[in-house]
Image (spheres, grey):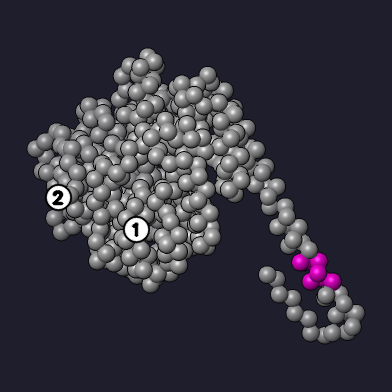
Amino acid sequence: MKVLLLNPYRDINRYVPQHLRSYVSFTPANIGRYSILPLDFAYLAGVLRDKVDVSILDAHALALHPEDINLKPYDVVVVNTAPYSHWRCSQTFVGHVHESIHAAHQAGARAIVYGPHATVAPDDFSEADCVIIGEPEGVIEQALEGNDRRLGPKYLEILAEPNYELFDFFLYDSRRCEQIFEKLPFGRVGVLMCSRGCPFNCRFCFRVLAPFKIRSHSLTSMEKILHQLIEVQGCKCLFFEDLTFTLDKKQTIELCRLLGRYKVPYVIQTRVDCVDEEIAVALAHSGCYKIELGVESAVNSVLEEFNKQIVWTDVERAVNICRQQGIPRVIAFAGIFAPGETRRTIEETRRKFHRLGLRFYPNIWFPYPGTILYEKAVQDGLISNIGADWTKLLLLAGTIGTNYTADHLRQICQQIEYSEWIREKMLKIPHVIKRIGKTLVTVQAIYQKCKKGDKEIRVIWR
């Protein structure tokens, strides 16, 4: 049996109506053009190793639409509605999935679908031969047998060992990353995780594929994964997709010792209340280039509303610790226009971010199914029934429990984005002046040597 794992091209210009595209960039639903591999395929390839003939096609990285792909060689096409990196902040359209299913059938292949959209609304993919609800690894072999129209939910007790042999790592380079490595020339990007799941219950989180139970790789397993990525595939930087990388302190420190052998720059995500000085030291010494913190808001009432279980002083402590211990980049994520929020509370969050030296991104809270925002929209009669195609939710993002319209929100976000851009440019002025000063001093020294008749002049630009 020949099986293709297909990561479809999520082309906003093709699948999102033109009048809604301007909203997408200010919501977490913007999947963008990224250059990290779909980690869910690595796990599926590991489960299916030596059992079927598996191939991987990352059509999103290659910008290939279904009509550009030859699916005739395959017996089964497995389509994800969103890659693992976007299981919690999925795009709000699924036209690419329906087109991929249709293309598979036209080529004479069976189509299997999984992902957050399929988990929430499996009936919306009735044309698929099988819909997987929940994590796909536990039932993928059963799905390939072709006897079931719907499987799951089933969540792993023990994480499978990922297989990276089938990926084309030339597609994944840090210079093509939009945000993770800030387009720095590290080289090939390796994507991995130490643990899956999240024990917290933040009420804004779209966690249909993030159960409360934590499943972790052993240190021996992590050694094998790092060997695959760094020594076999030649990755020059790593991105950990753990929802809370530093959740287990002992495990984090042991893993940092292992990472310290390679000295490869890596990026992690975690919570501010899961960082202390000992952890920050271990991260900095093992090559952690960037830490992304889930802050969400600087307004304590908003944090309490979303059950974040932190306060702003926790954020200040964590950011200062990370910087003091030498982690080069500290990033904080925040949302705006939660129920009851005003321009005043948003400006308060911006000011507090700036005082800590943090960049502020205009990011509107999105009413994903199952979240407090979605429930409130249902109660207010704004939503009656929703399926996997949530494009219309774009117009509700930020308007639930506030006095703003979608057009007004877009204008405010554009203003914030522009003012943040101006602020960043202004902050660079002192550095530019300092560099110009150094250059003038160097030029003056050269001039003096020329006047004295020095024949050998060396100029070293730093």
Residues 221 and 39: in front is: 221
Label total for image: 2
Span colored in magenta: 438-444
* Residue 68 image point, x, y percent: 36, 42
Left or right: 212 in relation to 188:
left
In this rendering, the answer to whether 161 lies above or below 347 is below
The rendered magenta stretch, by its main secondary structure, is classed as helix
Query: Where residue 460 sits: x, y (%)?
Result: 71, 75
- Is residue 337 found inside the magenta-colored segment of the image? no
> As shown in the figure, which amino acid type bears the numbered disc 2?
Met
Label 1 Cα crowd, 10 Å radius (few <14 / some 14-19 / many 20+): some
How far is disc 2 from disc 1 in space, using C-alphas? 44 Å
Sooner in the amino-acid sequence: mark 2 or mark 1: 2
Q: On screen, 61 above or below 24? A: below
Splitting the image into 4 quarters, where does residue 45 fall?
bottom left
**Which quarter of the picture shows residue 189?**
bottom left
At horizontal 53% and vertical 58% (from top left) the residue drawn is 323
Label 2: which secondary element: loop
Is 50 on the left or on the right of 174, as rendered? left
Q: Residue at x 30, y 45 (%)?
A: 198
Of badges 2 and 1, the one in the foreground is 1
The residue that label 2 is drawn on is 1
Q: Residue at x 52, y 38 (%)?
A: 298
Mark 1 highlights which residue? Answer: 249
